[in-house]
Amino acid sequence: MAKYLDPKADLTFKKVFGEQKDLLQSFLNAVLPLKEGTEIESLEYLSPEMVPENPAKKYSIVDVRCTDNHNRQFIVEMQMYWTEDFLQRALFNTSKAYVRPLEKGDGYDELRQVYCVSIINDIAFPNLKDEFYHRYVPANIEHPENTIKGFETIFLELPKFRPSSVSDKKMMVLWLRFLTEINEQTKEIPAEMMENKYISKAVGIVEQSAYTDAQRMAYDKFWDEIVSERTLMKGYFRQGHAEGHAEGRAEGLAEGLAEGEKKGRAEGLAEGRAEGRAEGLAEGEKKGRYDIARNLLAMGLPKMSVMQATGLTEEEIDKL
């Protein structure tokens, strides 16, 4: 029984789409909104070295670049996880590819249409729960049907993809099933996938037997690095969230006290009491009202205000 590697990995993705022109052409024709008569008939690979590598995310993004018989450019990216800076990266790559062919003295009519297809193995747009296909073009806000031709960016969220959500593009479904269903746990390839010559060829490329031991080690290292990067990013997120929460809480209390001075002691004390209660609960019931009083005193709140906010007596406050 044949065993397979995941086509989303750096090694396999490049072997399927970066070395097989017919497969890349089939994939692009399937996922891009190309009008009848403007489909890709042939293509040539371009150098991927358009932007400097980011050492912190060198494993998380794989890309392939090409141009076709209509002189259009295409960028296909495989993004293993999503952060907001990847959106900016996609826009940067697309715009840079758009202006790159223009030499000094050339007219603007030399600019070529650019398509960027970002395949994302993560949730990038959580507010669009049932949509996995996202197409962006420069458009008039008040009249979105009026667009500026030049470049388009397509985002495909693989975790959201369901074959039933695409009714009119069979080839798109097959390619996305190839990317989402084939991995090390796959034991049998569905017949409808093997009946298609492009998908069948791609499946053959990701068979484990086609790779040397050294390539398998590189493949395993890729997934190890992906896990490490994702863990690192989650750590940064948690740290940033905690720091932001603490900073926001401190700023909120300071603003509340300042506003309380203007609007009257009653409002200020109410906000201080609410903030103190929240902090007391967060640190645990054991610390109680004495910890709240210490915090309020440390922030410069007058003794009388602390007494009113905590219910402690003046004698108790003096002992802190």
Image: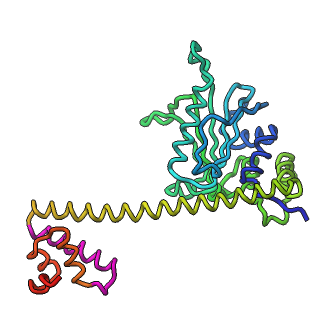
In this picture, residue 98 sits left or right of residue 202: left
In this picture, residue 127 sits left or right of residue 27: left
Q: Is residue 215 visible?
A: yes
Q: Position of residue 36 (x, y in %)?
A: 71, 33
Residue at screen point 73% across, 29% down: 68
Q: Position of residue 222 (x, y in %)?
A: 70, 56
> Which quadrant would the C terminus be assigned to in this image?
bottom left
Q: Is residue 108 magenta?
A: no
The image quadrant that residue 190 belongs to is bottom right
> Which quadrant would the N terminus be assigned to in this image?
bottom right
Classified by dominant secondary structure, the portion drawn in magenta counts as helix
Of all residues, the one furthest to the top in this rendering is 105
In this picture, residue 92 sits left or right of residue 293: right
Q: Position of residue 151 (x, y in %)?
A: 58, 32
Q: Which residues are magenta?
A: 265-287
Of all residues, the one furthest to the front in this rendering is 319
Query: Height in image: 287 above or below 72?
Result: below
The image quadrant that residue 108 belongs to is top right
Q: Is residue 192 visible?
A: no
- Which residue occupies the foreground of this view, 125 or 310? 310
Q: Position of residue 88 (x, y in %)?
A: 51, 42
Query: Height in image: 268 above or below 102?
Result: below
- Which residue occupies the foreground of this view, 137 or 243? 243
Residue at screen point 26% across, 60% down: 251
Query: Height in image: 297 above or below 88?
Result: below
Residue at screen point 33% across, 79% down: 283
- Which residue occupies the foreground of this view, 276 or 154? 276
The image quadrant that residue 256 belongs to is bottom left
Query: Height in image: 81 above or below 303?
Result: above
